[in-house]
Amino acid sequence: MKIAIDFGGTAVKISGYKGEDFNPLWFETIPAHSEQGIRQAMERAEQVIDAHRTGQLECLGIATPGIVDSKACRVTCINNKYEDALDIDFRAWCKERFGCGLVMSNDANAALVGEVAYGCAQGFENCVLVIIGTGVGTAAMMDGKLVRGKHNQAGILGGHFIVNPFGRGCTCGAVGCLEAYAGSREILYQAEAERDHVTSAIYRERPLTMKGIARCWENGDRYAARILETAIGYYAAAAVNMIRAYDPECVVLSGGLTNSRFIVQEIEQIVRRQGWLPWGVPVFRHAERTDLSVSMGLLKEMCDYERD
């Protein structure tokens, strides 16, 4: 059995796989409590794995936020979550606890690999991924290989492209990052801070979520439309920036909010208007198994690891 652990900021997703079948034998989600560090999440993940495994593990795959050195299986930089991850030797932990090999990846990189190998981007070798969530995650692939760069940050920092050099502060310490405007936390904060939406349907959404705002928008609520039109402009900016930087043939949009076809269509239309694409327009794909994108990517990397 191969095990994939996706250490998300809100939830930890754990999957068991047999061979190269990308349909998991089992799948469990546990709360992340990422503000408490990754060690406590690792301990609870161990309990889940022990409850499911029946013998020796073939391989373990781990994905985390932040900058990950996949060769050394170390987290080298992480922002605002799992801060103790920098001190952990994941390879030593894996060997001691499970006695098997380890592959490790940044979560957005793993998600893109998963979508290309088994998901919505099969058949494409030049792709970018934009994940719309609490933050904005990105990844890029060129000629069938992930773009990593000298320090493993290439492709994954699209959420920290500067969109306003005189704007809001970001959790990364910079000013004007796209994520400071497009992350769902910031958008919800702005929505709650406004006082003119008491007659809007979103006023009755409690707790207020991005999906709730999208639902109100689809039902014709003007205030919800104003909020989402602003957000969509930023999401489209992320896609345009990634297209200009990496010249993809396919753009994968992921995250719970992209389940709204209206939002996917609006992003694509803005890209068509603003993309400066003399050769044409990339194909847009929507990741339909967002809970498993990262795990599927880890499965692909584990299979490649075993073949090597």
Image (tube, rainbow, N blue to C red):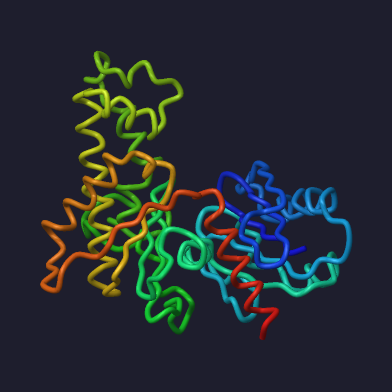
Quadrant the C terminus occupies: bottom right
Where is residue 256? Give x, y as percent.
43, 42
**Front-most of residues 279 and 43:** 279
* Residue projecting furthest to the top: 199
Q: Residue at left 40%, top 70%?
A: 123
Most extreme residue toward the right is 55
- Residue at image x 23%, y 56%? 237
Q: In the image, is residue 220 above or below residue 123?
A: above
Residue 282 relative to residue 254: left or right: left
Numbered disc total: 0
What is the quadrant of residue 87 in the picture?
A: bottom right
Relative side of 167 to 72, left or right: left
Instruction: From this view, report whether residue 243 is shown above or below residue 262.
Output: below
Q: Position of residue 292 (x, y in %)?
A: 56, 53
- Report whether 52 appears left or right of 185: right
Picture quarter with the N terminus: bottom right
Residue displayed at 27% across by 15% down = 198
Provide residue 37's location: percent of width, then percent of height: 66, 53
Residue at 46% across, 24% down: 207
Q: Is residue 212 above or below residue 70?
A: above
Give the image location of residue 147, x and y in percent: 42, 77
Q: Is residue 185 left or right of residue 297?
A: left
Between 21 and 225, which is closer to the camera in this rendering? 21
Closer to the camera in the image, 282 or 136: 282
